[in-house]
Image (cartoon, helix red, strand yellow):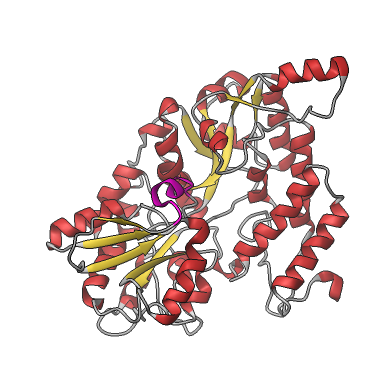
Amino acid sequence: MKKWVSVLSVAGLGLTLAGCGEDKPDLTITSFTDELQGPIDKFEEINDVTVELQIIPTADYRQTMQPTLESGDGAPDIFTGEIAYMQQWLNADYWTDLSAEPYNVTEWEDEYVDYVYDLGKDEDGNVRAMSWQTTPGGIYYRRSIAKEVLGTDDPKEVGAMMSNMDDLFEVGAKMKEAGYALFPDEGSISKFTSFATGGSDPQPWVNEDNELVVTDERLSYFDYAKTLRDEQYTALAPAWSPSWYESFNGPINYNMGWEELEGEAATAAEAEANSQIEVFSVALPTWALDAVFKQSSNANAGDWAVTNGPSSYFEGGTWLGVYEGSENKDLAFKFVEMMVHDEEFLTERALETGDVLSYKPVTEAIKDDMSDDFLGGQNHYEFFLEEAEKIDANVVTPYDQQLNELFGTQVGAYVEGEISKEEGVQEFYNQVNNAFPDIVTPDEK
């Protein structure tokens, strides 16, 4: 998953076509980010072909692609999918079965991180899509701030200070006292509570009996997010907003919500609100290193590192496959093969971008000597590959994206003081019932 807001500027509200001429291209690829443009350039050069990249903004991708894939009208030869919704596409046979002749990708199975390979299978066990990356998460933090406030910038030592929720909030208090924000906004804490793919005991949002799984840990997102806001441990920079991106480069203006105060208190608060604050850390997965930080945090290159939070989690990832109705399947598979199985290409990509690969022959070859200048020379492979071993693909459901959004909206309303926690939980159940009538919510049992 690449939740790149930058795609919106690249693609506007429609399709952005890269590298297309007047004649019909040899191959068309549709995706929700521009991350494939570099590989496409290389593929064109090697194979003397023309490839058209169609980019649909992330927010519109699923809704735009669904009717196209269903009808076949204007469908691409290759299209990508994200972990949050691609199970529905896998089982709709939109992607070609790559387990079958002449592709035989089942012969590659042992060469990939287990969960990445497994998530590309349909309900019958046929491989329909593959990914070159693995996407465990961590907490990216500023080394200089860590050294100033915590006395060390060493990833393992900093991680030990944030290995549970109580300790994490203690770090938040120290950051506030020193004039820093722990996180850009309250969303970072969700990775360690509400995500189906996170928390100390990850559970699917919907179990085998089609029941909504709402654990105490998941509900704790309400409480932890409210504490972050009330204690002023964040910079009020919502995820993927311009201020969120700006926070990775240096101090940003912030408003701590003093608008309801009056008199002298309001005057003092206004001065505070118009001041600036610098953000210490943010919780994001592997792909953020290249897709977020290296694209938007050049001012602080080398001052970052990544470590653990209170619990492991994973998020997103980009899978790609060949459209079942493609008339260029051989050429299309050749591109897929380069993206996920070409050792020379993948080695170059990992060293250039820092992307953490799912293809084990390459990760085994480079993991011991991996070093990323953006992370102050840290070997992030050492951390992320260990985290990848903890991922269980069984917690992923087709409902995750929508349920996370519905749940997060209610948590946000609670944090803003618009509703009580009880009202937020009940409204979440109401919205789940409306969106997915077949799912049994706890209040219906």
| x 82%, y 59%: residue | 425
Camera-nearest residue between 175 and 360: 175
Asked if residue 221 shows in the view, the reply is no
Q: Position of residue 437 (x, y in %)?
A: 73, 78
**Residue in the foreground of this view, choosing between 265 and 86:** 265
- Residue 268, magenta (yes or no): no
- Image coordinates for residue 275, horizontal then vertical, percent: 66, 19
Asked whether 242 or 319 is in front, the reply is 242
The vertical placement of 153 against 133, above or below, is above
Q: How many marks can you see?
A: 0
| Residue depicted at 78% across the width and 20% down the height | 269
Front in this rendered view, residue 38 or 397: 38
Q: Residue at (77%, 48%) from the top-left corner?
A: 413
Q: Is residue 279 above or below residue 414?
A: above
Whether residue 90 is visible, yes or no, is yes
Q: Which residues are magenta?
A: 4-13
Specify the quadrant that holds the C terminus.
Answer: bottom right
Figure check: 347 above or below 103? above
The reply to whether the magenta stretch includes residue 6 is yes
Instruction: Give the image quarter of residue 98.
Output: bottom left
- The answer to whether 336 is drawn above or below residue 145 in the figure is below
Q: Please, which residue is most extreme toward the left here?
A: 48
The image quarter in which residue 237 lies:
top right
On the picture, is 74 further left or further right than 154?
left
Give percent across and percent down for residue 412.
73, 47
Residue at point 40% right, 43% down? 290
Dominant secondary-structure state across the stretch colored magenta: helix
Asked if residue 294 lies left or right of residue 169, the reply is left
Residue 126 in picture, x, y percent from top left: 42, 81
Q: Seen in the image, is 125 located left or right of residue 42?
A: right
